[in-house]
Amino acid sequence: MSWLVDSHIHLSDPFYEKEIDLIINGMQKIQIKGCCVSVDYTTSIRTLELSKKSSLILPFVGIHPQMANQEIEPVSELINQNSDKLAGIGEIGLDKTYVNAKGDFERQEHVFRQFLSQAEKLQKPISIHSRKTLDEIYQILPSYSLKGVLLHWFDGSKQQLKKAMDNGFYVSYGPVMVYAKDKQILLENADEDKILVETDGPVRFAKCFGLKPAQISFIPSVVFCASKILRKSYDELSKILEKNSDVYLGI
């Protein structure tokens, strides 16, 4: 049986705190690992703590674009001090939704570039938030020699997807794919060896899973849906996803 990987989940979010031991136990039983991404210094500390509880929790540390006004140095130092323990750097990126004042986007880019530099130096994979900013991100990334680039919850056009594939980037799809035809079309057009799956928990999804906050246990359902879209068996796609995850993470 293949090991599945939730390529982007916020297990360090306070929502999961009371049930984290049950979640880890469930991960072991259904053979799922989780790339636990962080959004700021507090969640980065929590992510590192969680990774000590179980090897199934793969720690990613970074600053989300919504939090770009926070100090970079403490998180950057965490990365340097724990580089041997980190699976990757993230969640990092750009998002025009969070631009409320002059200079906000420039600050996001400054923070993003800081973590890209660290990822390049340490040769760590990255998990990128790219809402409404794919073109800007595509202009920035060629300046860095990066190992494993994931455009999480890919929401671009077919042309932007092709550019991601041409550059060897990974794209991930989650529960929204169950009901969103545009995401299903993107999945069909993605290179087989560049597809990953995710939940982005604890995000809630309007038209599936009863509006419940996403759990890592949703992953088998996401894989099942993706297997139908790609006209593969569940086991066949699981093996492909396991290999893709290993290559992305450098395992």
Image (cartoon, rainbow, N blue to C red):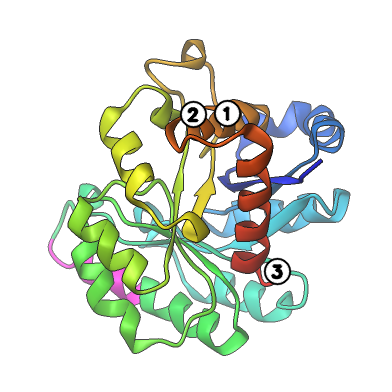
Q: Report the amino acid beneath label 2.
A: Lys
Q: Is residue 208 above or below residue 27?
A: above
The question of residue 187 being in magenta is answered with no
- Is label 2 in contact with label 1 (beta carbons under 8 Å)? yes
Q: Judge left or right: residue 18 versus residue 250.
A: right
Label 2 crowd (10 A; few <14 / some 14-19 / many >=20): few
Cα separation, mark 2 vs mark 1, equals: 7 Å
Q: Which one is nearer the viewer's eye here, 109 or 122? A: 122
Badge number at residue 249: none
First in residue order: circle 2 vs circle 3? 3
Residue 33 location in percent, x, y?
73, 46
Q: Is residue 107 above or below residue 6?
A: below
Residue 203 location in percent, x, y?
47, 31
Q: How many circles with numbers are drawn on the protein?
A: 3
Name the element at disc 2: helix
Span of residues in magenta: 102-111
Q: Which one is nearer the viewer's eye here, 147 or 47? A: 147
Residue 41 location in percent, x, y?
57, 59
Label 1 crowd (10 A; few <14 / some 14-19 / many >=20): some
Provide the residue designation for mark 1: 224
Residue 235 falls in image quadrant: top right
Residue 45 falls in image quadrant: bottom right
Q: Report the amino acid beneath label 3.
A: Leu
Q: Report the amino acid beneath label 1.
A: Phe
Q: Is residue 196 above or below residue 93?
A: above
Name the residue: 32% across, 84% down: 142
Provide the residue designation for mark 2: 228
Name the residue: 45% across, 38% down: 230
Badge number at residue 86: 3
Q: Name the mark nearer the viewer: 1 or 3.
A: 1
Name the residue: 42% across, 23% down: 205
Residue 152 location in percent, x, y?
43, 52
